[in-house]
Image (cartoon, helix red, strand yellow):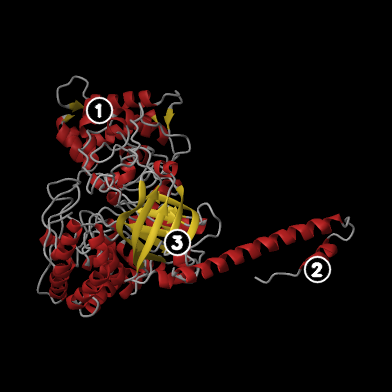
Amino acid sequence: METQPLELMTESMNGIFPNTDSGWRTALRLGAGTILLAALLVGATVLQQGSRAAAAGAPLDSDQLYRLTNVWTLHLKFTPDQWEAIEPKGGGGPGGRFGGPDNRREDRALSPVLMSQADLNRDGRITAEEFVQLARDWFAAWGGTQTGRLDEGQIRAGLEAIRNPAGSGVSGMLLGAEGKRNGIASAFGIEFDYVRADLEFEGLLLKDVGVRYKGNGTFLESRNSLKRPLKIETDKFVRGQSLAGVKELNLQNNVTDASLMNEVLAYRLYRDAGVPAPRTAYARVFVTVPGLHERRFLGLYSVSEAVDKTFAERHFGTRHGAIFKPVTPSLFTDLGADWAAYNQVYDPKGSAHDEHKAAVMELSRLVTHADDAAFAARIGQFIDLPEFARFLAVMVYLSDLDGILGPGQNLYLHRQPKSGLFTFIPWDQDRSWGQFNRASQDQRDQLSIHRPWQGENHFLERMFKVEAFKRLYLARLDEFATSIFDPERIARQVDEIAAVIRPAVREESDSLLARFDQLVAGKLTGATGPFGGDRTKPIKPFALVRTQSVRDQLAGRSAGLTLGGGFPGGFGGAEGLGRFSRTLMQALDQNRDAAVSEEEFTGGFAALFQAWDRDRAGQLAWIHVRSGVEQDLVPLAQASPGFGGGPRRDRGFAPNRPGPDARPEAPTPGAPPPAEPRR
């Protein structure tokens, strides 16, 4: 945009306001001068940062910052108050409880089902008659009319036959409360707040950057350690401040990956496949807190590029698209026509215009309701199919069971404003290369290329029925199996990075170095993390076996192995709405004979309606149903997995771990409306 000279601006204003007092001219000159001065100051700041960076040895641009084998030195300086304030608020800590008192959390499972199935006229309200009619329908559908009664097993089977819109097991814990972060840390009630700190990057000092902890499993598993994952925003408190034009740094502690290269090499593989993926580098991170830590070495971190508007501009040539970070095991499931029901699930980053939100909802309706012919004909109008084929080919090769093949997280969606197409972007790859034990090692090694997902995945099931897409996907697997998936090529990449980062690993600890050397050499190690399991293969032996498996499956010599519904041992398995069967049975079985008659079933629903209709309005909105389920039909809680790992955060300030509130928070009238789950 060209800047108009002040004289021309004055002449223009004279033309607009010919009869006004000339006093405005002075104000205009002052205002324009202020704007010009501000622009000059910002420009001077950028130039000054560039010259300071060059003098200090810091990167001059993002390409230099994100070179794969760069190992930077980064020093964070906190005051004691800032160091204390960075501690997350809430959460029970490792091994603690999920959610609020008695493990209660927002109900996003049964309440939307009750609303969608009882609200016969779709007016967003349930009357007593509609609620009782639902009871009659369920009693008949679940087999009650044959014997005149239902036992708990029949009630459980009936509920299990209804698709759970919130997911189950670990998947059901990943969606945060409305307006909060998604992820397992959110299930602990943990919130991360930014604090001010000074950042010294290769001698370049940036004052008052914003710093907070980040992550989910990686944070929980390192909470008793100083080496936790960190996010830095250079312009959080100082407008326009950046490092080599970069305003956000993601410091990954790689607590589950002692090789420190799972994520780095996974992103490289995606980029080599033509998929938009973050760039990376490494950083030796130090911290100073007067009286507590004096240039304390936290360890070696990998640094991951943020998926933001700058990322989008570099890959798609525009900052005007929309970026979403979905968390759902049921991607593109129809939740109705109100965006409020989708907002927490798809978690838009920054502003998302109505057209982008409408596209998510329209695509969800297509995936949920269209017949096979209509779906195949229209899906290419929403999704960049060639890019998705590349994305999925790499994800399946990596046996990444912590993304859309598993619980439905760790990805971004970008929608381009001109084409209207959604592009898939990978995220959080520390457990890629077959190292997330939601299945046995054999299953990860031999993961089926024709059915690679775990449990039910309606979106991928539909995609794999589209012949045009399946051909694209298999063609990319065939291409990559003889090129970028070459085990020797991958082994050379491991050795290249190992040679560069080994000195920093040795600096961190002897024990980490010993484990690092084992992994680089390709030796199997014990499983890490809260879920246990068998030993995991490092990158080199996994690539050797996995590439051969993909080649054999493409040639028809092997069918590969498909997956069950959850972690080995049953944690986080296929249990869905059936977990409500015990409390529903207790609410309905008035004579306590371990069976429910039709009179008890309908009468129990009528009693629940009366209890939940606290305003005596004669109708229930979703907020009333959700509050009622949370109060009266809370399922028995599953034991939560434990998290720990790493040395203690010694001599630091104790984590702030307040006790839970006395009661779960009731929904507010502004809460999202119920979803429309499928049977």
Looking at the rendered structure, the secondary structure element under dot 1 is helix
User: Vertical placement of 666 versus 61: above or below?
Assistant: above
The vertical placement of 32 against 614, above or below, is: below
Within-10-Å neighbours for mark 3: few <14, some 14–19, many 20+:
some
User: Along the horizontal axis of the image, is 9 left or right of 127?
Assistant: right
Q: Are marks 3 and 1 in contact (CB under 8 Å)?
A: no
Please tell me which of labels 1 and 2 falls first in the chain. 2
Point out the residue furthest to the top here.
591
The quarter holding residue 372 reads bottom left
With respect to residue 470, does 290 lie above or below? above
- The residue positioned 45% from the left and 61% from the top of the image is 308
Q: Secondary structure at mark 2?
A: helix
Q: What residue did someone put label 2 on?
A: 7
Residue 364 lies left or right of residue 319; in this view the side is left
Examine the rendered structure and indicate whether residue 3 appears above or below residue 218: below
Tag 1: residue type? Phe
Q: Which mark is residue 308?
A: 3
Left or right: residue 72 versus residue 7 is left
